[in-house]
């Protein structure tokens, strides 16, 4: 069974540009989560999808971040325009049920210059 | 609110040494507690979990006991190996409501084991 995959693995962009991160959850997992780790700090929750609906988006830092999960399969997280403080590692996770174990992808390392 | 405080690293040990990584938490009610591990170049993997007070989670020689009286979930291993070198994250999940799926993480502890 394939695990959670994320694309790209690394992205380097300039301040003001747009970046789109993609996450493919484990097949059949209705729950999809985005997290972010800024260097040296804790991993912080961004949002939670159940199928295509946003269950909890209270962790999204501001309106420059837009997450979608059309069709309830893969998800994208767009940052527009990117700022320096957006640099970090963005993790995606999925779970079959909300109380179940969350399986994480390898992360996308974003660097905004 | 919910939060996790984890022992800061890095931790450097010789092979076969005893490992303890401290983790304490703040939460309302009865959260579930987790330890995740991130090996170099990989994503986070669930190492062990405990869902109620006095539960002991164990996996790959690692153990952690859910202590409600001290709000702690310390990770221990009796004899570490070089292959245990990784970053370890303590995490909790709240009891319920619309934020049930959210995990709260500590800052992570880098463990390096030398042969």
Image (tube, coloured by chain):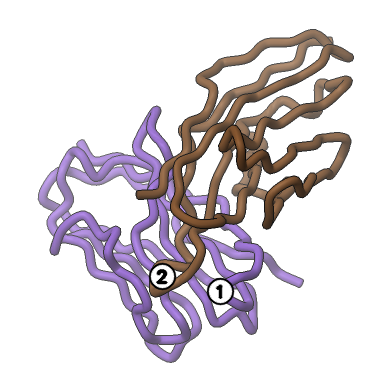
Chain colours: A purple, B brown
Number of residues whose C-alpha sits closer than 10 Å to that of mark 1, classed few (under 14), some (14–19) or many (20 or more): many
Looking at the image, residue B19 sits to the left or right of residue A91; the answer is right
Residue A111 lies left or right of residue B78; in this view the side is left
Query: Could you tell me which quadrant the C terminus of chain B lies in?
Result: top right
Identify the element where label 2 is drawn. Answer: strand
Observer-nearest residue: A111 or A69? A69
Task: Give left or right: position of B12 versus B2.
Answer: right
> In terms of image quadrants, where is residue B109?
top right
- Number of labels in the image equals 2
Residue A98: assigned label: 1
| Chain of the residue that carries numbered disc 2 in the rendered image | A
Image location (x, y in percent) of residue A103? 63, 61
Cβ atoms at labels 2 and 1 below 8 Å apart: yes
Q: Position of residue B6 (x, y in %)?
A: 52, 29
Disc sitting over residue B114 in the figure: none
A81 or B89: which is nearer to us? B89
Pointer 2 residue: A48
In the image: residue A76, left or right of residue A104: left
Residue at position x 74%, y 10% in the image:
B13
Q: Disc 2 to disc 1, how far (Cα)?
A: 10 Å
Between marks 2 and 1 in the image, the one whose residue lies nearer the viewer? 1
What x and y, as percent, mark residue A105? 57, 57
Q: Which residue is located at x 13 percent, y 64 percent?
A: A63
């Amino acid at each position: 069974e394939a695990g959670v995959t994320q694309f790209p693995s690394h992205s380097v962009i300039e301040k003001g540009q747009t970046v789109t991160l993609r996450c493919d959850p484990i097949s059949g997992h209705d729950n999809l989560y985005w997290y972010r780790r800024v260097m040296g700090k804790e991993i912080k929750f961004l949002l939670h999808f159940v199928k295509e609906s946003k269950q909890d988006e209270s962790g999204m830092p501001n309106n420059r971040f837009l997450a979608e999960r059309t069709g309830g399969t893969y998800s994208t997280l767009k940052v527009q325009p990117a700022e320096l403080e957006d640099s970090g590692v963005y993790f995606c996770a999925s779970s079959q049920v909300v109380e179940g174990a969350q399986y994480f992808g390898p992360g996308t390392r974003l660097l905004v210059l | 609110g919910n939060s996790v405080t984890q022992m800061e690293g890095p931790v450097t040990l010789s092979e076969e040494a005893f490992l303890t990584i401290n983790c304490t938490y703040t939460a309302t009610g009865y959260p579930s507690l987790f330890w995740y591990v991130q090996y170099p170049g990989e994503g986070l993997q669930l190492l062990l979990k405990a869902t109620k007070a006095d539960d002991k989670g164990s996996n790959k020689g690692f153990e952690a006991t859910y202590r409600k009286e001290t709000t702690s979930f310390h990770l221990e291993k009796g004899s570490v190996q070089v292959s245990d070198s990784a970053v370890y994250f303590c995490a909790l999940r709240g009891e319920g409501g619309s934020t049930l799926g959210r995990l709260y993480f500590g800052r992570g502890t880098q463990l390096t084991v030398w042969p």
